Amino acid sequence: MEYSALTFRPSANIAELRESATIAVSQRAKALKAEGRSIIDLGAGEPDFDTPEPVRDAAKRSLDQGATRYTAVEGILPLRQAIATEANAHYRGADGVTAGEVVVSCGSKQSLYNACLTLFGPGDEVLVPTPSWTSYYEMVGLARATAVEVHGDPAQGYKVDVERLERHATPRTRGLMLNSPSNPTGAVYAADELRAILDLAAARAWWVISDEIYQRISYGEGIAPGALDVATRRDNLIVVNGVAKAWAMTGWRVGWTISPPAVAKAMAALQSHTTSNTATVSQHAALAALTLGEPVDAMVRAMVQEFRARRDAALPILQKSRALTVLPPDGAFYFYVKVPGAGSVPDAGGAFCHALLEQAGVAIVPGSAFRTPDWVRISYAADRAQVIEACTRIAATAEAMA
Ligand code: GLU
């Protein structure tokens, strides 16, 4: 049979699926660069730093010592123990976290997917504070459940509260996606705000998937509060984290979940039919990241300091433009910005991103990816001078379009 005779029709599994806009923007920026265009890429949320040298060295040593074969699907025991130890530094409940509750995966993206597929199914509704990272909506959809958008208040950094969540709850509500510090807004939930939401979820018997991948990239005192800092019970809680962002280890693909043992077992079973374990060498790198202490911890703090310096340098440039509304971020490495045309143009963010890329050579992500099309997301996980230059061009483009 000629290949051309085959007609491709997406299966029902992916019929509704939309490509990841965060990934698509950075791929488009790379393609334009390859064509010779000078592009500043503030699309993907990927630190521009190298993985700390002691972590790379530990990974190289592990290869020479034979870390080249399969491991247990859920990951090597020392790594899961290190993750449990780190979790117990935050959790004060009587039931300390054990390695048996940890499943290591190929990145926190896979961990989130494992959790969504394991916990949600047809007929279920999942509350998604909006704007949220683009993949939450799609993952809930891939589980054939319904993502229910709960729009936050822009004046509160788009954070949601108990009252807003309750308003969107129905008898079919089965879970809630939490993310602090938030991608795309950079908002950080205070401990008491998190506690109130967790109390509501426990009272309503909702699963809470708490994505804490940006926890260490926080500009307040110490690291941002996570669910384990405030939880009094964990039987409805799945904490997701990984090494990608804080340790500049995106390409190693190591994330994990901490969940009740029965959920962990089910997620490991799912993963046993998809990827099996993440790369063995990457697990050893993650183990080094979590256990080497200083100087690796100092390197992480230095990277966070640099993100803060970029934020502090670029934020006033955006704030000075009367054509833009900016949410000042307290964590992660994104500016979330309302652009000209908001409220009158159907996809103001998309139109702005298109004009910015074509006319000013800057790639950023349209807010439609995060279900708020009047906005755009700017990643400042890039060289400081480039971030400043790009934000200057963004402000100029906004003035011209206003
Ligand atoms: N999470 C990052 C972002 O939002 C990386 C790309 C992705 O996986 O979406 O840009």
Image (cartoon, helix red, strand yellow):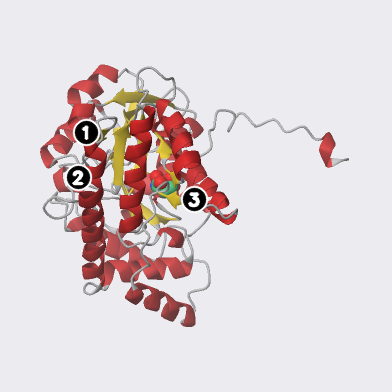
Asked whether mark 2 lies closer than 8 Å to ligand 1, one says: no
The amino acid at mark 2 is Asp
The residue under label 1 is: 157
The amino acid at mark 3 is Gln
* Quadrant placement of the C terminus: top left
Circle 1: is it few (<14), some (14-19), or many (20+) Cα within 10 Å? many
The amino acid at mark 1 is Gly
The residue under label 3 is: 271
Q: Residue furthest right?
A: 1
Percent position of residue 94, x then y: 14, 50
What separation in Å lies between label 3 and label 1 (alpha carbons)? 35 Å
Which is more foreground, mark 3 or mark 2? 2
| Residue located at (37% from left, 77% from top) | 58
The answer to which quarter of the image holds residue 245 is bottom left
The answer to whether marks 2 and 1 mark residues whose Cβ atoms lie closer than 8 Å is yes
Q: From the viewer's perspective, is 101 left or right of 194? A: right
Secondary structure type for disc 2: loop
Q: Which one is earlier in the sequence, the residue at label 2 or at label 1?
A: 1
What separation in Å lies between label 3 and label 2 (alpha carbons)? 34 Å
Percent position of residue 186, x then y: 26, 42
